[in-house]
Image (cartoon, rainbow, N blue to C red):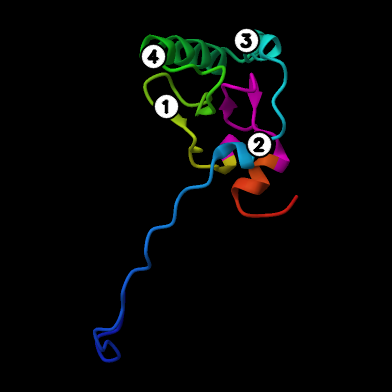
């Protein structure tokens, strides 16, 4: 907030800026065949199931998740798991392994997470 004793009514929120493309933050894409085969290991049961379910849902909705950068919060419970096109879910301590990137067939790596936070790895 702004203290009322110093507020002269001059504050204005800045104009919105366009969101940069997620591809600017991600490492180079592998071949599509590598992406299509990529799923979390079955030993990561929640992540494996969430990615499979989300890929199925995105295809059913008409998206092409192997070409578009959908980021999946794959480690949350089934009903809380969500995906975002060209955006990253919140990067928290409990998601230190990274979110799943559908058009990479893998999780975000540390340098990518640094770039999403505005740091140069």
Q: Which of marks 1 and 3 is in front?
A: 3
Q: Nearer the viewer, mark 4 or mark 2?
A: 4
Crowdedness near tag 3: few (<14), some (14–19) or many (≥20) residues, C-alpha within 10 Å: some
With respect to residue 97, does 33 lie above or below? above
Q: Mark 1 points at which residue?
A: 82
Mark 4 and mark 2: Cα distance apart in space: 23 Å
Q: Is residue 101 magenta?
A: yes
Residue 108 x, y percent position in the rendering: 64, 32
Closest to the observer: 48 or 120? Answer: 120
Q: Name the residue under label 4.
A: 62
Q: Mark 2 points at which residue?
A: 26
Closest to the observer: 63 or 106? Answer: 63
Mark 2 and mark 1: Cα distance apart in space: 19 Å
The tag earlier along the polypeptide, 2 or 1, is: 2
Whether residues under marks 2 and 1 lie with C-beta atoms below 8 angstroms apart, the answer is: no
User: The residue tagged with tag 2: helix, strand or loop?
Assistant: loop
Mark 1 and mark 3: Cα distance apart in space: 20 Å
Q: Nearer the viewer, mark 2 or mark 1?
A: 2
Residue 82 x, y percent position in the rendering: 42, 27
């Amino acid at each position: 907030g702004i203290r009322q004793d110093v507020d002269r009514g001059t504050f204005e929120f800045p104009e919105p800026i366009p969101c940069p493309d997620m591809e600017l933050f991600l490492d180079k894409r592998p071949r599509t065949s590598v992406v299509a085969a990529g799923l979390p290991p079955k030993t990561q049961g929640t992540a494996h199931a969430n990615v499979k379910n989300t890929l199925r849902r995105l295809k059913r909705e008409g998206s092409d998740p192997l070409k578009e950068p959908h980021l999946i919060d794959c480690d949350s419970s089934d009903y809380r798991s969500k995906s975002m096109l060209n955006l990253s879910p919140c990067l928290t301590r409990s998601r230190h392994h990274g979110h799943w990137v559908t058009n990479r067939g893998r999780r975000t790596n540390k340098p990518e997470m640094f770039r999403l936070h505005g740091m140069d790895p």
